[in-house]
Amino acid sequence: MRILVTGGAGYIGSHTCLELLNAGYEIVVIDNLSNSKLEALKRISELSKKDFQFYQADLLDKMTLEKVFLKNNIEAVIHFAGLKSVGESIEVPLHYYHNNVTGTLNLCQTMERYNVKKMIFSSSANVYGVPERVPITEASPLSAINPYGRTKLIIEEILRDLYGSDNSWSIALLRYFNPIGAHESGRLGEDPNDIPNNLMPYINQVAIGKRDKLNVFGNDYDTHDGTGVRDYIHVVDLAKGHLKALEMVIPTKGIDAFNLGTGTGYSVLDLIKGYENATSKKIPYTFAHRRPGDVDKSYADVDKANKILGWKALKSLEDMCYDSWRWQKNNPNGYDE
């Protein structure tokens, strides 16, 4: 079975491509490499000992999208491609709406033309905005509080309307919590351009000596130690969640949303301590002001994914921290060796 993976060179996309190949699927990857590296795709081939078709293109490029579907017998799509920085989305909202929403519309229109109606969509816990209570279930109110989150919510609504108009579609909306970690080989990991937006790559850069210290944004949250609590999930567990969703989507019809997290909340200081214990690296930090829009606590209720998809995150916080450090130690400059 041949799966199109949009954004397949990115952090979560690359790990999912490897899991797909290892599970016997054929893949076709499209990625514009705006926030990813060609080297990641070479390493997927190296680790899986399999080759696959790659198109360097944007979902805004309708002609290339047409070519991808015309030349490959695509049977399902896993859609990762999109811009993903909350802070950047606040600075350039129109760019985010155009890229994420218009790109998805182009993809769906092309899928419809070629009668490919199986999709896994990479959504986000950002669609819950400020949660009323934790753990967050899929039935919790949806109200994104930044343009990035709103693009994910708009796309979810578009996909629901699409299914409403044509019940032959089968779509899984996967709402990720906080992916960290790296492949156990140390060959695939998170390689952000410029200053990392996310906590773990920043911790890694402090550990390797690229940065002096970590800024912890806020120590007056309503949590056990005053720092924000999040649901951190190992990227390999997350990737395996996509395979479980694919197994559900292929033989069925319908649309449904699933939280992918561990169901456990860890604070920023918990994560720092866990990293220090797992790696024996000291992470100096200072407290800074809260960032606008950050919430006290956000972690998932994962019962639905567990029961319906038969999926559960298995890796521990220690695994997440150690695998992150192994990636950084083996690749001090990321994919730019």
Image: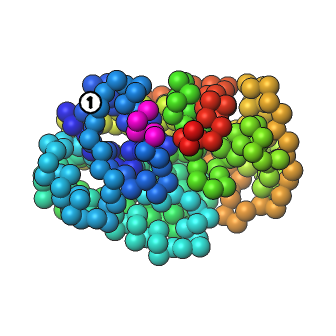
Q: How is the image coloured?
A: rainbow
Residue at x 65%, y 52% (from the top left corner): 196
Q: Is residue 86 left or right of residue 20?
A: right
User: Residue 254 lies in magenta, yes or no?
Assistant: no
In which image quadrant can residue 331 be found? top right
Tell me how many marks there are: 1
Residue at x 27%, y 25% (from the top left corner): 24
Instruction: Indicate the amino acid at tag 1.
Output: Tyr
Residue at x 21%, y 63% (from the top left corner): 63
Q: Is residue 188 left or right of residue 195?
A: left
Q: Position of residue 337 (x, y in %)?
A: 57, 38
Q: Residue 258, can we see it? A: no
| Residue named by callout 1 | 25
Q: Position of residue 187 (x, y in %)?
A: 52, 30
Residue farthest to the front, as pictured: 337
Magenta stretch: dominant SS? Answer: helix
User: Residue 42 lies in magenta, yes or no?
Assistant: yes
Q: Position of residue 323 (x, y in %)?
A: 61, 28
Circle 1 SS class: loop
Q: Which residues are magenta?
A: 39-43
Towards the viewer: 154 or 50? 50
Q: Is residue 134 left or right of residue 46?
A: right
* Quadrant of the rendering where the N terminus is positioned: top left
Towards the viewer: 13 or 229? 13
Residue farthest to the bottom, as pictured: 94
